[in-house]
Amino acid sequence: MTEKSLSASRHVAASPSAVFDLLATPARHPEIDASGTVLRSRTGGRLTGAGDVFVMEMHGRDMGDYLVDNHVVAFVEDREIEWAPATHGGDRGGQRWAHHLAPEGDGTRVTHVYDWSEVTLERLLPYLPVVDADGLAATLDRLAAAVEG
């Protein structure tokens, strides 16, 4: 990946459908977040496609409690889901979170990507990246535990 993008990948012993269903259900995101910043979803139900927006309650060490509007920018059932966070009621900041799924043996190869290459807001730059490759891998471990169990 580039200097403004990180990724991690691992095998998950669950079907692409099971993995995708978890990722497309924002209420389950706190289960898989290894950073501890995702508190809960304010959006009920399952995402249905690109253009959906889901609101998450967040907590950051530097920012305290805040809300994020996540705009779904890619959605291919059982294959890919990606969202771009924005300030609540505001503009997207240029970050993107993606999950790419591929059948692999008895399960799924999941690749988790964090990309901040489009960030232009000077006030955000000192905080980036908000996660490292180990953090992405830890999230994948939590995802695996949530769908394999």
Image (cartoon, rainbow, N blue to C red):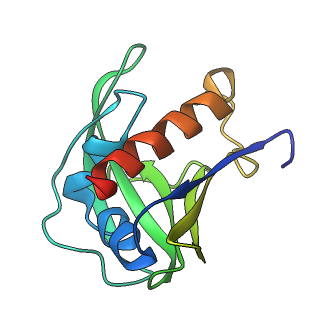
User: Against 74, is 146 above or below?
Assistant: above
Which is nearer the eye, 77 or 125? 77
The residue at 73%/52% (across/down) is: 118
| x then y, percent, for residue 137 | 57, 38
Q: Say whether residue 11 is left or right of residue 12.
A: right
Q: Say whether residue 79 is left or right of residue 87.
A: right
| x then y, percent, for residue 28 | 23, 53
Residue lying at the far top in this picture: please name it.
Answer: 61
Q: Which corner quadrant of the image does residue 6 belong to?
A: top right
Q: Say whether residue 13 is left or right of residue 7.
A: left
Q: Say whether residue 84 is left or right of residue 24.
A: right
| x then y, percent, for residue 55 | 26, 55
Residue 45 visible in this rendered orientation of the protein:
yes
User: Against 58, is 32 above or below?
Assistant: below
Which is nearer the eye, 83 or 136? 136
Residue 132 visible in this rendered orientation of the protein:
no
Which is nearer the eye, 24 or 110? 110
The residue at 69%/31% (across/down) is: 122
Which is nearer the eye, 8 or 106? 106
The residue at 45%/75% (across/down) is: 16
Residue lying at the far front in this picture: please name it.
Answer: 106
Q: How many marks?
A: 0
| x then y, percent, for residue 78 | 46, 81
The residue at 27%/48% (across/down) is: 56
